[in-house]
Image (spheres, helix red, strand yellow):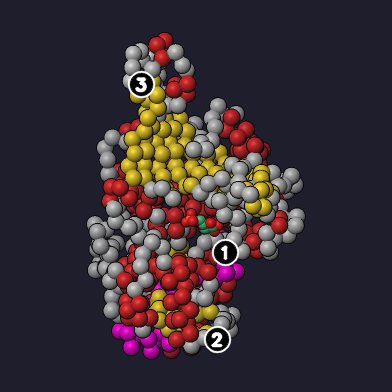
Amino acid sequence: MNEDNPFYDPLRFERRVPPCIVAIFGANGDLARRKLLPALYRLAFERRLPPGFAVIGNSRSRMSDDDFRSTMRDAVKEFLEDSPFDESRWDDFAQGIFYVAGDVHEPELYPELKSRLADVGRQRQTGDNVLFYLSTAPSLYEAVVDRLGEASLSRGEGWRRIVVEKPFGHDAHSARSLSRGIQHAFPEDEIYRIDHYLGKETVQNILAFRFGNGIFEPLWNRRYVNHVQITAAETIGVEGRGAYYQEAGAIRDMIQNHLLQVMATVAMEPPSAFEPIEVRDERAKLLRAIHVMTPAEVDANAVAGQYGPARIGGEDVPGFRQEPGVAPDAPTDTYAAVTLLVENWRWAGVPFYLRTGKRMPKRVTDIAIQFNAAPHRLFASTDGDAGPWLRPNLLIVRIQPEEGISLRFLSKQPGSGMKLRPVSMDFNYGASFGARSPTAYETLLLDVLAGDSTLYTRQDMVDASWAVVQPILDVWASRKFDFPNYPAGSWGPKAADDMLARNGHSWRTS
Ligand code: BG6
C-alpha cells in the first residue's frame, strides 16, 4: 500500500514530509499551545519540514496573523521541552503561520478558510496537501467534519487528512456515531486518531525490544509470565481541567485509550511486517481478545477512587471536589484500576492489572512483567530466608519520567553460604544514547504528514477498547461510591490492593 507513496520510508530512519498546510481548529487552546506548536517549531528547527510548509490556525478569538504568531511564539517559548528556542529559526517558521478567526458552527467560516488555504497554498507552494487537526472541544468534532465535507474541503487536488484528538467519543455508542460522521467526509485511510502514548519513544521501543531481539519473545507467554502491571500515576490533580475531567473520569481519560494501547503493544502477537496494516491488525486483535466483563464481574475486577484533601509536604492540597469547576458532590473517578484477562493461547489466565490515578505519591508510568519463580528452590535450605523467593524475575519497562528497562534477578550475596539477593540490570536511554528523544507529538505529526498510520489507532481498535470499559462504566453509573476514598498523595483506595491480594499479588510501589 505504501509503495506508491514517495514520502513513506519503510525503514523508518527518516521521514520526508511533502509540502503541505496544517490547519488547526482550536488553535488558541491548550493542546495547540502546549503540544502542537512546540512540536511543529521543533521539527522546523531540526529542518524536518519542507520549505513549502504552512500552519493556518483557527479559533473564535479575533486576531491578525501577526497577533497569532506572537501568541504562538510565547507559547512555544514557554512549552518547548528540553530544547532551545532560537529567535531566527522561529522568525523563519513564523512566516508560514496564518490565522483565520471564526466560530466552527458558522457556515461563513468555511468559504473563508477555503480561500485562505488556496492563497497560502499558492504563496507557500504547498501542493494542495492539507492536514486538518481537530484540537477543539470534542463536542465540536462532528460539526467541523460535517462542514468540511459540505464545503468540499475534505477533497482536493492533493491529499486531505484529518487528525482527531482523544477523547474519541464518550462511550461505545457516541464513538461509533462520531466515526460515522467523520467517515462520511473523509476516507478511513485519511483519518488519523491520535493516542499520544503510541508516539512515546519508550512505548515504540516495546516493539523493538520484543521483536528485534530473539531472547525475550520465547518467554513472553503464560508459561513464564505470572502477571503484568501497567501503571500511569500522576502527582498533578486536574490542573484547571476540572470541568472536562468531571465528565470524563480516569477510566475514560487514561484506560480506554492510552493504557489499553500500551497493553496491546505489550501483549500483541508479532506482526509479519512493520507496516501500518500489519501492526494495527495485531493491536486490534489483542484488544478484541480482552475478556469483556459481565456486570456481575465488574465489582471484583474494577476499582474506582477519588482523591480527598490532604496535607502534603506542609501544604494543604484540595480534594477533587474542591477543585475549580468541580461539583461538590461529583461522582467522578480520579483513580481507576482494572484486572483484565486476554482470551487467547498466549495469555489465558495471566492477569493484566492496569491502574491510573491523579494525585499519586509520584509520577511514574511503567510496565512490570512479573515472571514465575524458579520451579525448584535449589537454594532454599541454605539461604535461610524465604524472602528472595517472593521476588522472582521482574522486567520493568519504564515509560516516564525515567526512560529505560530493568531486569531484576536473584544473585548470590558475596560471602560464605548461598544467600540470594535481588539485583537489577538496567538500560537507561539517556546514558545509552545521549541524544534528546523527540516528543510524542513530534513523532506523530511527522508520521501523519508522511502518511504513515502505524502509530495511530483505528476505528476497530477504538470500538474494541470501548467494549472493554463500557460494562465498567455502566455498573459505575448505577453505583453510589463513598468518595473520596483515598487521600491526595497516596497510592489509591484499599479496594485496589484487595483486588490484587485476592490473586496473591500486590501493586508495586517503588
Ligand atoms: C491526557 C489526559 O490524555 O494524558 C491527561 O487527558 C493526562 O489527564 C495526560 O494528564 C498524561 O499524558 P502524559 O504524556 O503526561 O503521561
Image position of 440 with respect to 151: above or below: above
Q: Nearer the viewer, mark 2 or mark 1?
A: 2
Please state if 21 lies on the left or on the right of 299 as rendered: left
Q: Earlier in the sequence, mark 3 or mark 1?
A: 1
Q: Which residue is mark 3?
A: 413
Residue 79 locus on image (x, y percent): 45, 67
Q: Is residue 130 magenta?
A: yes
> How far is disc 3 from disc 1 in space, using C-alphas?
61 Å
Q: Is residue 296 magenta?
A: no
Q: Nearer the viewer, mark 3 or mark 2?
A: 3
Could you tell me the amino acid type at mark 1?
Ser
Q: Quadrant of residue 410?
A: top left
Q: Secondary structure at mark 1?
A: helix
Q: Secondary structure at mark 2?
A: loop
Could you tell me the amino acid type at mark 3?
Gln
Q: Is any part of residue 69 visible from this angle?
A: yes
Give the extent of the magenta segment. Answer: 116-139
Q: Which residue is mark 2?
A: 62
Looking at the image, which is closer to me, 29 or 86?
Answer: 86
